[in-house]
Amino acid sequence: MAIIRNCDADAVFAVYPFTPQQSISDAIIKASYIPVFCSVDGETTKGLHTVSLAKDVECQGAMCVVLNTPTSDLNLLAVSKAVDIPVIITITKEDTDVRARLDAGASILNVSCGTKTPDVVKKIRTSYPNVPIIATGGKTNETVQTAIEAGVNAITYTPPSTQELFKHVMIGYREE
């Protein structure tokens, strides 16, 4: 929460490897002074539960709902019909049927294809020049630049952990 409250990002992309919970999304949204995009599904959360969570995060104040790769087009459609905020769908494979995802209600694409991300973005951009695309930027300035040059509208970046940040602070304290 301290990182969310003290970051200089333009938004918080709240995606984590656990089952989404109302208390977590509520805490993130309350702690943030910038827009929050909340994940509401994943490998363990599917179907009507995803729709309920999407409606909940919308009511809590999320600016977008994020759905992950395993989400079916039918579930994507159900979520997009249930909320009035944009729905982001994550793309992790270059052979994803982007048209089907858009037809099912995706408003924004989140491309997270590892080292293939820039190539997948270019491919999507060729067929869908006006679709908003967010992409993982990687860990270096060069990989972020490559994703930008491929045509993304926004980059997600995982900040250093509290441990990493505090380590540098402590080194400074020890040198004084």
Image: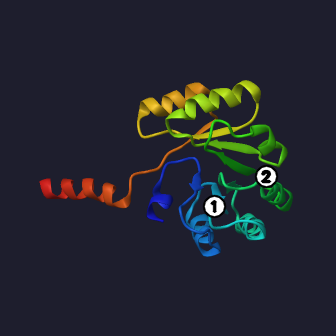
Task: Say which element carries label 1.
Answer: loop
Please give the residue where the numbered disc 2 appears in the rendered image: 73
| Front residue (pair 6, 96) | 96
Could you tell me residue 93's position as x and y percent?
Answer: 62, 41
Q: Residue furthest bottom?
A: 23
Could you tell me residue 22's position as x and y percent?
Answer: 65, 73
What residue do we see at 58% from left, 28% from top? 119
Q: Residues within 10 Å of mark 1 (few under 14, many from 20)?
A: many
Vertical comparison of 18 with 100: above or below: below
Q: How is the image coloured?
A: rainbow
Left or right: residue 64 compared with residue 136? right
Left or right: residue 163 compared with residue 30? left
Which of disc 1 and disc 2 is earlier in sequence? Answer: 1
Vertical comparison of 113 with 147: above or below: below
Give the quarter of the image for residue 2: bottom left
Could you tell me residue 161's position as x and y percent?
Answer: 38, 57
Q: Quadrant of the C terminus?
A: bottom left
Give the quarter of the image for residue 162: bottom left
What residue do we see at 62% from left, 72% from top? 21
| Front residue (pair 66, 116) | 116
Left or right: residue 73 compared with residue 43? right
The label shown at residue 92 is none
Vertical comparison of 133 with 149: above or below: below
Task: Say which element carries label 2.
Answer: helix
Give the quarter of the image for residue 152: top right
Q: From this viewpoint, is residue 176 visible?
A: no
| Front residue (pair 124, 57) | 124
Q: Residue furthest front?
A: 95
Please give the residue where the numbered disc 1 appears in the rendered image: 42
Amino acid carrying label 2: it is Asp
Q: Residues within 10 Å of mark 2 (few under 14, many from 20)?
A: some
| Front residue (pair 44, 24) | 44
